[in-house]
Amino acid sequence: MKSKGPLLLVVALLAIVGVALALRMAGDPAGGRAVTLYTAHSQQDVDALLPLFEQETGIKGHVVKMGSGEIVQRVRAELGNPQCDVIWSVAGDQLQANQELLEPYTPKVWEEIDPAFKVGTHWLPYTGILVVFCANTAQADERPAPQRWTELGDPYFKGKISSARADKSGSAYMQLATVLTIHGEQGWDVYKGALANFALSGSSSAVPRFVNDGEAAVGITLEDNALRYVKGGGPVQIIYPQDGTSLAPDGIALVKGAPHLAEAKAFVEWALSKKTQDLLVERMGRRPVRKDGATPPGLPPLSEIELVPYDFEGAASHKAANVERWTQLVAELGL
C-alpha cells in the first residue's frame, strides 16, 4: 500500500496557499477592508490616530513601525511582491530619494495644501517637522544648555547629548542636512564636533525620553517629540537654535503596486483632511501642511523662529554620499 504522506503534504500546502490568497483578497482576516501601513510615527501617535481612522472609514489598519531608513529598505526588498500600501510619516527627502518605489497620487484636498510644502514628486506632504534641541532643566544649573549648533561641540557635553542615527532616522539626517545648509562645507567640522559628544540612539522619538529621565542633558529631536514631554510636566525645555533650524515636510505616499490601492487612497485622504490635520496640531504638536492650519498650542509661531531654507533637493540627491560620510565619522570617532 502506497504512503499517503506526500499527498497529504501537498493538500496541506495547497490549503495554506489558499488561505493566504483569500486573506490577501479580503484584506482583513475578519473579511473587511484593510490597509497596511509602514510608519516612523511614534507608537503613541499610532495608538491615538489609527483607531480614529478605522472608526471613521470602516477600514482596518495594519501597522508596521520602523525607522525611516528601515522602511525604505523593506519596501525596496518587497518591490517584486509589495506587502505595504502606504508609507506614513517618513522624512520627505527620504521619499524623494526613493521615488521609484512610490505611486503618484493627487488627493482631492490638494488645493488645500500650502504651496510651501509642495516640494516633492510621487509623494505628498503630511506634516511640517522642525528640528530642535531639548534640555533637561534639572541639569541647567550645572551648565547652560547649548543655544547654537556650534555649541554642541563643547567638550563638557561629551556623552551627554542624545541623538538618533542619521543612517536610520530621517529626522537625524535632517539635522545633518540642516547644519550643512547653515555652515556650508564647514558644516562637516561643526557636525563632527557635535557628533563626538553624541550618545547615539536608533530612534529620534526616544531622544527626549532620555533627556526627560536625566540620562542625557541635551537631545536633538523633532519639535513634537520634545513637546510631548513638556506637556507631560517633565523637566524638558525646547530650544530653537539661534543660528537657525529647518522646517520641512515629512511625507505620506502610496507604494507602487500597493495590494489595497483603494484603501490606501482612502487613508491618504483621511490623513490630509482638516479634521485629522487639526488633531495633529492640537494633540501632537505637529505643524500643519494645510493652508487653513493653526499654530500648535504651546509653541511659538514660525515667525519667531530663526528658520533657514531647507535644501530639500540637495538633501535628497546627496543623501547616499552624506550618510556614507557620516558613517565614516562614526567609525573614526569610535561611536
Image (cartoon, rainbow, N blue to C red):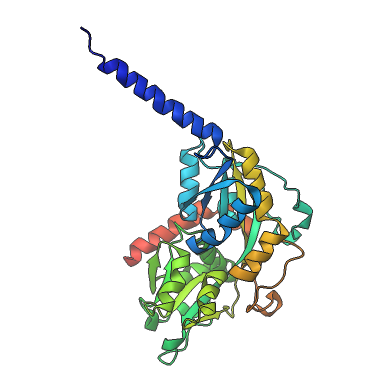
Residue toward you, 263 or 93: 263
Of the 4 image quadrants, the one containing the N terminus is top left
Q: Residue furthest bottom?
A: 141
Q: Quadrant of residue 275?
A: bottom right
User: Residue at horizontal 26%, vertical 14%?
Assistant: 4
Whole-percent x, y for residue 227 in the image: 55, 75
Whole-percent x, y for residue 271 in the image: 65, 55
196, above or below 157, in the image: above
Q: Is residue 71 left or right of residue 291?
A: left
Whole-percent x, y for residue 104 in the image: 67, 42
Q: Residue furthest front?
A: 30
| Residue 230 shows in this picture | yes
User: Residue at horizontal 69%, vertical 43%?
Assistant: 105
| Residue 80 shows in this picture | no
Number of callouts: 0
Residue toward you, 176 or 114: 114
Q: Is residue 329 left or right of residue 229?
A: left
134, above or below 20, in the image: below
Q: Residue furthest right?
A: 111
Of the 4 image quadrants, the one containing the C terminus is bottom left
Q: Quadrant of residue 292?
A: bottom right
Residue toward you, 256 or 95: 256
Q: Residue furthest top?
A: 1
Whole-percent x, y for residue 91 in the image: 56, 57
